[in-house]
C-alpha cells in the first residue's frame, strides 16, 4: 500500500530519574525515584501544553521507562497503545532509528521512550544542527533524565535518516524544591 508523505513529529523522551540499583538488582528492574515521578508528570503536562499528542508509542521494556510512560498518561498526555520494544534497551542511535522505521504510516506523532546514550545520539544525528537554535543550545548542555526532544520531518517513517529532521523543541523538566 502506498501512502503519501506527510509531516511527522518524533518525540524522543529519556526516562525520568530512577532509583539507584540495589545489590544484585537487574538494571532493567530499576523504578523511578520520587523526583523521577514528578519529572515524568511535568513532561506529560508540557507535552499537553504544547499540543503534542501521541499516535503511537514505542517504549523500552525497562521498568523506569514503563513507569515514565504511565506518569505521562496520568498527567493527561494522550496515550496511544504502548508497544514494548526490546531493541530500545541499551540502544545505539542506529537501533533507535531502526525502531522508528517500523512506526505505522498512519501515525503522525511517534513517542519513543528510552535511554541514554542512544536517544541523545539519535537526536543529534537526526537534526545535525538543523532547527531551533535555542533547542540546540539546550541539547548541547546535555540530555538529562526526563528530557524530551521534538523533531519534525516530512516523509515516511521508513525514510527517516540521520541529517533529515529539524529539532523543533527540547525540554528539560525543572523541578522546584519545596
Image (spheres, helix red, strand yellow):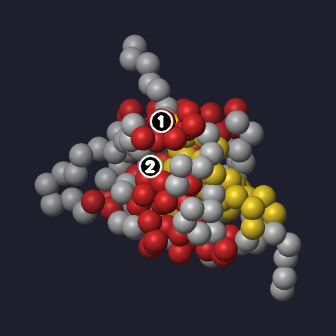
Viewer-nearest residue: 8 or 70? 8
SS state under label 1? helix
Question: Mark 1 — residue?
Answer: 138
Query: Quarter-wise, where is residue 92 in the image?
Result: bottom left
Q: Residues within 10 Å of mark 2 (few under 14, many from 20)?
A: many
Question: Which numbered tag is attached to residue 15?
Answer: 2
Q: Position of residue 40 (x, y in %)?
A: 50, 39
Label 1 environment density (alpha carbons within 10 Å; few <14, some 14–19, many ≥20): some
Image point (49%, 67%), residue name: 96
User: Residue lying furthest top in this view?
Assistant: 178
Q: Is residue 122 visible?
A: yes
Instruction: Determine contact: label 2, label 1, CB under 8 Å.
Output: no
Gap in Å between the C-alphas at discs 2 and 1? 17 Å
104 vs 126, nearest the viewer: 126
Residue that extends furthest to the bottom in the rendered view of this protein: 1
Q: Position of residue 157 (x, y in %)?
A: 68, 70
> Residue sitting at 57 percent across and 37 percent down?
133
In the picture provided, is 93 more to the left or to the right than 135?
A: left
Amino acid at each position: 500500500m502506498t501512502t503519501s508523505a506527510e509531516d511527522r513529529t518524533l518525540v524522543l523522551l529519556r526516562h525520568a530519574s530512577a532509583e539507584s540499583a540495589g545489590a544484585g538488582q537487574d538494571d532493567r528492574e530499576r523504578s523511578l525515584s520520587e523526583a523521577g515521578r514528578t519529572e515524568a508528570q511535568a513532561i506529560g503536562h508540557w507535552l499537553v501544553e504544547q499540543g503534542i499528542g501521541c499516535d503511537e508509542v514505542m517504549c523500552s521494556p525497562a521498568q523506569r521507562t514503563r513507569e515514565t510512560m504511565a506518569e505521562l498518561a496520568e498527567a493527561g498526555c494522550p496515550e496511544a497503545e504502548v508497544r514494548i520494544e526490546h531493541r530500545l534497551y541499551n540502544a545505539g542511535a542506529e537501533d533507535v532509528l531502526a525502531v522508528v522505521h517500523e512506526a505505522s504510516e498512519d501515525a503522525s506523532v511517534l513517542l519513543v521512550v528510552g535511554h541514554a546514550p542512544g536517544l541523545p545520539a539519535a537526536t543529534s544525528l537526526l537534526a545535525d544542527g538543523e532547527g531551533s537554535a535555542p533547542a540546540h543550545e539546550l541539547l548541547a548542555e546535555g540530555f538529562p533524565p526526563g528530557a524530551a526532544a521534538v523533531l519534525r520531518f516530512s516523509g515516511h517513517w521508513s525514510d527517516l535518516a540521520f541529517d533529515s529532521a529539524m529539532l523543533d523543541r527540547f525540554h528539560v523538566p525543572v523541578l522546584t524544591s519545596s
